[in-house]
Image: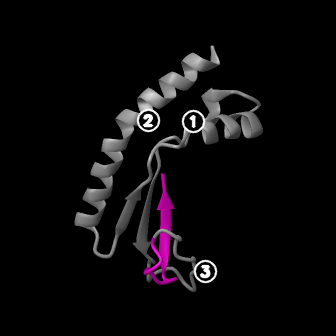
């Protein structure tokens, strides 16, 4: 049933959060200028709304209960990169960065 799928997704997401924190710490340690943010689990009301609205009630298609964003310095080898606005939760970053979210 959809409730079992939802419960299983939240179980997996709860166990994924520590891995995302670890990944963010490893990125920050390995790469100068990287900042990572691990978001709290997506709320159940928001997840239910998104599942109904975007996926016709199919919880198996909901893939972003656990999320992380890493702001990386823009690659200098890319000719004329498009400016990327800094994520609102990292307002001190310049537009000269690339945000990567998982």
**Residue at horizontal 56 percent and vertical 25 percent from the top:** 6
Q: Are marks 1 and 3 in contact (CB under 8 Å)?
A: no
Q: Secondary structure at mark 3?
A: loop
User: Relative to 70, is 43 on the left or the right?
Assistant: right
Q: Which disc number belongs to residue 44?
A: 1
**Residue at horizontal 74 percent and vertical 40 percent from the top:** 54
Dot 1 alpha-carbon crowd within 10 angstroms: few under 14, some 14 to 19, many 20 or more: few
What residue is disc 3 on?
82
What is the x, y in percent for residue 31? 28, 69
Over which residues does the magenta segment extend?
90-102
| Residue farthest along the front direction in this orientation | 45
Q: Secondary structure at mark 1?
A: helix
Q: Secondary structure at mark 2?
A: helix
Q: Main secondary structure of the magenta part?
A: loop
| Residue farthest along the top direction in this orientation | 1
What residue is disc 2 on?
13
Q: Earlier in the sequence, mark 2 or mark 1?
A: 2
What is the x, y in percent for residue 82? 61, 80
Query: Relative to 63, is 73 above or below?
Result: below
User: Relative to 29, is 94 on the left or the right?
Assistant: right
Choose between 76 and 69: the one closer to the eye: 69
Q: Earlier in the sequence, mark 3 or mark 2?
A: 2
What is the x, y in percent for residue 66? 46, 43
Q: Which disc number belongs to residue 97?
A: none
Q: Quadrant of the N terminus?
A: top right
Q: Earlier in the sequence, mark 1 or mark 3?
A: 1
Q: Are marks 2 and 1 in contact (CB under 8 Å)?
A: no
**Residue at horizontal 44 percent and vertical 52 percent from the top:** 39
26 falls in the magenta region: no
In space, the residues marked 1 and 3 are separated at their CA atoms by: 35 Å
Instruction: Tell me the mark number nearer the camera, choosing from 1 and 3.
Output: 1
């Amino acid at each position: 049933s959809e409730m079992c799928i939802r419960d299983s997704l939240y179980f997996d997401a709860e166990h994924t959060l520590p891995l995302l924190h670890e990944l963010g710490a490893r990125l920050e340690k390995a790469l100068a200028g990287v900042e990572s943010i691990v978001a709290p689990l997506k709320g159940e009301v928001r997840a239910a709304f998104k599942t109904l609205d975007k996926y016709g009630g199919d919880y198996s298609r909901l893939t972003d209960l656990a999320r992380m964003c890493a702001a990386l310095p823009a690659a200098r080898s890319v000719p004329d990169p498009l400016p990327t606005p800094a994520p609102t939760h990292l307002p001190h970053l310049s537009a000269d960065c690339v945000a990567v979210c998982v």
